[in-house]
Amino acid sequence: MNVDAAGEPPLPNGHERPSRILSSEGAITLLLALALSLGSWLGISLPSPPTRAAENAEPDAGTELFFEDQIAPLLEKHCAECHTTDDPQAMLDLSSAAGLVRGSQSGPVLTARNRERSLLYEVVRDGEMPPEEQALPPEEIELLGRWLDGGARFRNPPEGFIRMVDEHQVLPILLLRCTACHGAKLRRGNLDLRSIKSLLAGGESGPAAIAGAPDESLMIRRVESEACPPPGQLLTYFVARPSPSEVQTLRSWIGDGMPRETPVASASTLNEPDPSVTEADRRHWSFRPLPARIEVPHVAGADRLQPVDAFIAAKLKDQGLDFSPPADRQQLIRRLYIDLTGLPPTVDELWIWTDTPRSDWYPALVDTLLASPRYGERWGRHWLDLAGYADSEGGQSEDPVRAFAWKYRDYVIRSFNSDKPWDRFLLEQLAGDELADYRRPELLDDAVIDNLIATGFLRMGIDETGSRTMNFVPERIGLISDALNVVSSGIMGLTLECARCHNHKYDPIPQSDYYRFKAIFQGAFDEYDWLTWKDRNLDLESSAEAVARKTHNAPLEKLLKQLREQRKAWLKSNRTDPRMTEATLVASDPRLAVELQAIDQEIEQAEQELIPPPTVRALWDRGRPSPTYVLVRGEHDRPGRQVDPGIPSALSDGTSPITISPPWPSAESTGRRLALARWIVDPGHPLTARVLVNRIWSLHMGRGIVATLDNFGLQGAAPTHPELLDWLARDLIDNGWSLKSLHRQILLSRVYQQSSHTRPEHHQLDPENHLWSRMNVRRFDAEALHDSLLAIAGRLSDTMYGPPAPVAVREDGLVMALPDEDGRLRRSIYVQLRRTEIPTLLGLFDYPEMNPNCIQRSTSTVSLQALILHNNGQVHEWAGDLANRILARANENGNDLINETFLTVYSRQPTADEHTEAQKHLAQIAEMWREAGNQEPESARLALRNLCHTLINSAEFSYID
Amino acid sequence: MASTAGSLCSVALHALMDQERLRAEPVSAKADLAAKPVHHRARAQSVIHLFMNGGPSQMDLFDPKPELDRHAGKSFPGNAEQVGNVATANVGTLMPSQFSFSQHGKSGIWVSEALPHTASVVDDLCFLHSMWTDHPNHDNALYKIHSGRLFMGHPSLGSWVIYGLGSECQDLPAYVVLDDPLGLPKNGVRNWTAGYLPPVYQGTRFRTVGSPVLNLAPEYEEPARISQLANDWRRRLDQRHFAERSDTPELDARIQAYELAARMQLGASAVLDISGETQATLDAYGIGDPITDSYARRCLLARRMVERGVRFVQLFMDDQPWDNHSDLKTTLLAACRRTDQPVAALIRDLKQRGLLDSTLVVWGGEFGRTPTSQKVGDAFSGRDHNMQGFTTWLAGGGVRPGMAYGQTDELGHQAVENPVSVPDFHATLLHAVGLDHQQLFHERNGLREKLTGLKEPRVVTEIFS
């Protein structure tokens, strides 16, 4: 072994070099040797050829350098001011050899004989350190690099510094490059490289490595001859070749006698919270435990205020303000209907609630609407935003459809409608697979199946790992990071994602916390032992059901196969040009259209007769997690220290409050996510209830008590009414986590029922409405607009649940949902939401890009919205349907057309002036239609269609007072 | 801004401040289409991106490699895994340039015989011969070149530019996509998505046949005076509604959005109406010639749009005509013939009208092609994808004319001199329009998202005059 000859020469400048396309995003490793070998083969010299480690370096580069002579003064001069012994930055002490060797929060900062894998060198070379543009002079950077390449020699090696490479630098390389073939799934040559022990045991060809003899070690020989990973199979197993510096690490380790854990760098487990997080950090308001009791303020002169109102009134009074008067009754009815069901009241409903003499009509209406199945469709949708629901995998342009995502959507709607206690709802979604043994068919019932469906929550992000080329470790890590992001920002209000590459800049979240959190999911999401989305399905049925299904389906499947072949043959024989699309073909001849339709009908019929597979898109722990390493700078091939599963240090009280054990005896499951879920729903958790009530408040009131719904950290907004937030959170828990009770607390308050009218004193004293001195005027979101249009047009289907309604893409790119057999369209939550085919009407009104999810929708106001509402043929057709409905009703009950139209579209009567004006307008337009050649009553119908079209285009329809 | 001669946008720009507004309530920064100040002096006011989807072959168009020709037929010197796209590697031998090269103009820049018209304007072009990207698949490389990331869902370059600069046009969208009537490019409309930015920044498809913008014209028949009357009444209703809620500016913005929609109908028709163009202009672009007509019309429209203050115009071709895996000599030439004359005419036309100084024209694809041939079926007649080196050219917008920057190795395979990564490329384009890639960010999930990502890119300052 050539221990002294290592390391690449430094880059001539700070530029990224294309030969280093080992980017964290990229998938294909390109070796550096190419340009060099190419140059010598052609007999020409190439500009700045990258060289391969170990081959071209000076034989004794850097070995003459010693820490004490050259490096200590350099560190003292540039680094030791911040990286001191007492309270060092990033826990890295650079004032002593011992501190340097101990490393930082991320793990070791230097790797002997390998500057490229030394964090210390890297941050200095890239000018990241020292901070604030005090970069080291190039010659000092080079000195540091040469010292590292030369073996990082010390005259007086600090205690424990014997060997810099230990198993924790080697294992991650083996996991990344070797275990796809020599691991859990495959064990080629009967060799298992998942542990040092099994590596030493070796396989059919003997031990993989011989201590002290890298050149004789089979592992090194296979890798260096590029026999492993096998050429031509890199994409079969999604492995990239080890980089030269990784090979060098393997060599060094074997050369040093294959040491196990280096004693000084042995902080390989982090069961305790990271010591860099202090008590002061834990005193941030949202990290403090929820008080057991919150004092409701007494507001003078305002007796019998409900608690919610007392908190609001206290602050209003401080500013010399009072509540606004309540909105008028019909405004309130409309507000509640849209808010709780996403649909306006019908005219009959409107009158029932307007005319009822009941003094408790308001709470009765709240209860009625909370009990409506439409409630779950409305509020389930809000949760689907947070989960990042989509009916397709995304990633590649094919955007494969997620055939069973809808089961999760249905589970969410059912959970909201049944007011499933929120702690249970979260438990199921975070760890449903660890709540009951679903692997035993005799224990399977709907509740157990629901547990598994619920875990779909963790699988809503973009998943390209089922594609032909995008299933390398970086893509897998990207998917895991999306899932962690959804959990941390959506449920915990923490921007944990910021700590993926480095310590969080603002919050007390060290990078190790991110990876401890990631380790919780390692049993299910293991980037070294991966399942693509194609394999992450469970067929949950009893064995008798399975037999019955197969017997029933077999002949149908045979028939379907025949029919599909028939269809293909038909297309082939009728196309005059192979590039001709199906649409063009059938448009070319009506007879062809009829023929194709007949075949399609047969196919459809057979498909409908099939018993659908009991397939559930789920996430489950497999009980064999790989170790989890901090990834230096978030790069997949830069493992740092190993970490154990753990919760964010700032939320821990000093000893890890989560206990991890398999959920039941003999379970093939780590129990890690169950432990996390139990901790999250613990009534003492400082964030879960606060984050939830803030979200619900925001959806009702138009702004959160904490304006940043996803960020309760130091950079998040401060709560405007912290005690109210805590009171609501406590009340939710005391009411058994009942969401409907939380809705009632908010909806029955005076603050919710206020008018949205702004009075002069508001401009002075509460211009931004931070005190809630009035209600906010709000626009319909995309779904409320779409569904309300359909509802008033009488075109809305009330079918619940099941596979989504298909969409069609028009030739000009417009995407729209397709109607059912009766010409009705389903609510937008039941329309297929494929990432690449979001219905245009929804997309234009801010249906979000799920990337990975949406915590807070934006409300844009652009002319493309005007164009679709005004010019789109479908919307115009709905206006016609609306006119026909109103005419039919008027014929039946003799109601005034204009009143009826206003009541349907605006949920209110027109004023006398409005009525006169509309009457005149209607007559004028009817006359114009007559002049255009339309007889009565058609001219009147057309005029009414105009009236309807105008009202649905007017602002009042899509804004809620 | 660009010359507004004959434009409907010459109305005071300040009036635009409230034209379109997005209130990403309540905490996000206000986002709208109002013109915004630049970060530094802008060299270009508008961008025309001639996107050449599929991966144009650098060694057959702009990057002659005598060594490649000399060693034709030899096997690739190195590991075949490193040549190009591992997924489809059926690596053949070194394949010489399929077209002969000669030097052109005063600058003496090399262009192959496949692009005679482009060759005639080389003195106005600045070639980046050392582009490289991160992925050898179309899907991911397209996401990368358009949005800086390998995956879907991130905002495109055009969206970022509009997000940073706003609009200077009252009757046309700020970011227009002129896609091919023959069909969408690979990745479809995702190529011009606003990603997580508000949808107001997304590219608007502008079609040269039928209704130019989605829903621009009513999809129903109605006498004009009825529409007029109905619209007047709606305006009255909305104004009254707003007057009663005067502290909700969104309602005013909505009224303005309806007005802009109406103006857009006129503006779109005006920009499409090329009857005022001289026959000489039409001929120069190649309008009327069945091979060039489609691309020529879109090039001419691009000029007419930047003339009217459209900030970012992007041209696409159907599917991927530059993806010449087989029969390269014929298929590449076909793509050249469709585009060469219109592109050269666009450069001349912009220059002649004094618009080239303020318009940055960008020509290029998502990656390049391999020096080796690729086996498709039984034949070795095309080239595979190559992410390690390709050529893109720029023109106008303060970029040095007649310049060749960077080099690939002797086989044209890998960028070796002054390599330009995609983030470098993006930072450079932003620089040209007066935006600093560090200052152009969008706050999301606690992160400052940027077009150029985490690693600090390099603005290729050497190419600016």
Image: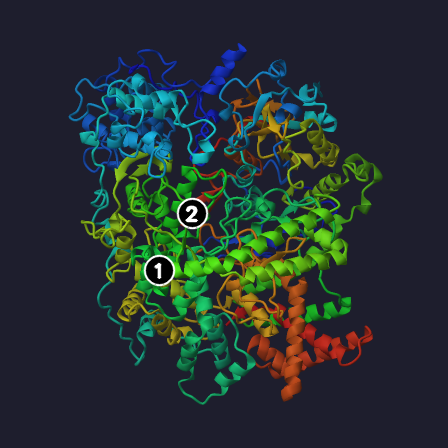
Q: Secondary structure at mark 2?
A: helix
Residue A552 in the image: above or below residue A207: below
Chain ID of residue with mark 2: A
Q: Amino acid at mark 2?
A: Asp
Q: Amino acid at mark 1?
A: Asn
Q: Which mark is residue A451?
A: 1
Q: Circle 2 sits on which residue?
A: A535
Mark 1 neighbour class, 10 Å CA radius: few under 14, some 14 to 19, many 20 or more: many
What's the residue at 62%, 71% (across, down)? A822
The Cα–Cα distance between marks 2 and 1, rounded to whole angstroms, is 18 Å
Q: Earlier in the sequence, mark 2 or mark 1?
A: 1
Q: For the residues carrying marks 2 and 1, which lies nearer the camera in this image? A: 2
Task: Identify the image quadrant of the N terminus of chain A.
Answer: top left
Instruction: Decide if residue B388 is in sight here.
Output: yes
Mark 2 neighbour class, 10 Å CA radius: few under 14, some 14 to 19, many 20 or more: few
Residue A734 in the image: above or below residue B208: below
Query: Where is residue A274 shown, x and y percent of the image?
Result: 23, 43
Query: Where is residue A703 shown, x and y percent of the image?
Result: 42, 63
Give the farthest residue toward the left. A159
Query: Where is residue B369 shown, x and y percent of the image?
Result: 59, 28
Is circle 2 on the same chain as circle 1?
yes
Give whichever of A876, A97 is nearer the camera. Answer: A876
Residue A908 in the image: above or below residue A319: below
Give whichever of B138, B222 is nearer the camera. Answer: B138
Q: Secondary structure at mark 1?
A: helix
Q: How many numbered badges does the structure rendering display?
A: 2
